[in-house]
Amino acid sequence: MQLLGEPTGNKIWTRKHLLGLEDLSPWEIRTILNEAERMLPNSRPGSPKLNDLAGRMVVNLFYEPSTRTRVSFAQAARRLGADVTDFSSSGSSVSKGESFIDTARNIEALGMDFAVVRHAVPGTPHLLSHHIQSGIVNAGDGAHEHPTQALLDILTIRQRLGRVEGLTVGLVGDIAHSRVARSNIHGLKKLGARVIVCGPPTLIPREVIEMGVEVNYSLDSILNELDVVNVLRIQFERQRGGLFPSIREYYRLFGVTAERMARAKPSLLLLAPGPINRGVELTPEVADGPNSAILDQVANGLGIRMAVLSLLAQAEANARLRNS
Ligand code: ASP
């Protein structure tokens, strides 16, 4: 019996869902990164399509706004030969009171094989995995995890700086409400990076400190130690207000400006998950400047999402072979 997909050594990918980076082993993270690099040349329109998901249906089940993640998953699935359906809660029977689980089960009855789930409530993709047969990818659950964002951040670091192990990565901003921060911490630490979280004390909760990161409340004092700075957005939509005096004050202390960049390592890699608020977390000249890899991150997201969908499909095919 031949099993599909043996990216490294004699291990095979067995996971049916990607719910977060907390559960993944370093080998699994590296496997996704390697697969993504292999798939990137096939990620663009005009390049040869792959057929890893031929005859399969991927559904974007989005209950929160999205630009990059949604378009990227749809394009990634199409590049693998899948049929893609985009569901958004607004304009659907959710407004008639249909529950999340019922909605997903009905869409599965229409042929869904993989659900890409974004929801404001932490743990929603995990809950769904107990109620449907489809493979599930977490595309952001509240302030909990956003695994494919962290994977594309880490891939960008590896591409630009040649490694992850031993690098010092600063996660700056609204750590408390950021799923990107949590997934980055899990992924970066598993690959051997040193992680410093930095922001106003009111935006760095104890629970994150307990994840084994260093904490610093002064960007200026850590700036010259950083190899990478990942600038996280203030998640106003998840805050009840009053967590820092004003946007101006925040910008003065934590804004990534050209003046601050001049005091950092010349090779400092600047990442931001987007959407970016120019003039709040970083200035336009920094966002568009030579250290910025913001658009590379977006492009790398295609490779990561192709890799994840393909690996989940391989796990499912392997499980079927094993049971036959
Ligand atoms: N797009 C990312 C997310 O959905 C980051 C952000 O919204 O700030 O979490």
Image (cartoon, rainbow, N blue to C red):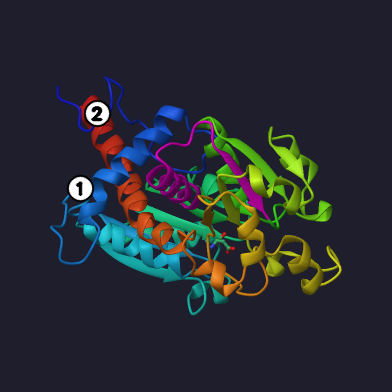
Camera-nearest residue between 148 and 13: 148
Q: Position of residue 192 (x, y in %)?
A: 53, 30
Residue 256 visible: yes
Camera-nearest residue between 63 and 244: 244
Q: CA distance from mark 2 to mark 1?
A: 14 Å
Is 265 located above or below residue 167 in the figure? below
Q: Residue at x 31, y 46 (%)?
A: 36
| Secondary structure state at the residue bearing disc 2 | loop
Q: Position of residue 295 (x, y in %)?
A: 42, 64
Q: Quadrant of residue 87?
A: bottom left
Q: Which residue is mark 2?
A: 6
Whether disc 2's CB lies below 8 Å from ligand 1 is answered no
Task: Tell me the crowding category of disc 1: few under 14, some 14 to 19, or many 20 or more residues within 10 angstroms, Cα based.
Answer: some
Q: Specify the quadrant that holds the N terminus.
A: top left
Examine the structure image and report whether residue 168 is included in the region drawn in magenta: yes
| Secondary structure state at the residue bearing disc 1 | loop
Whether disc 1's CB lies below 8 Å from ligand 1 is answered no
Q: Which residue is mark 1?
A: 52
**Is residue 61 toward the left or the right of residue 52 in the image?**
right
Residue 111 visible: no
Q: Residue at x 64, y 63 (%)?
A: 233
Q: Amino acid at mark 1?
A: Asp
Is 44 located above or below residue 157 in the figure? below
Q: Position of residue 222 (x, y in %)?
A: 71, 46
Is 73 located above or below residue 20 in the figure? below
Q: In this picture, which residue range is highlighted in magenta?
A: 148-172
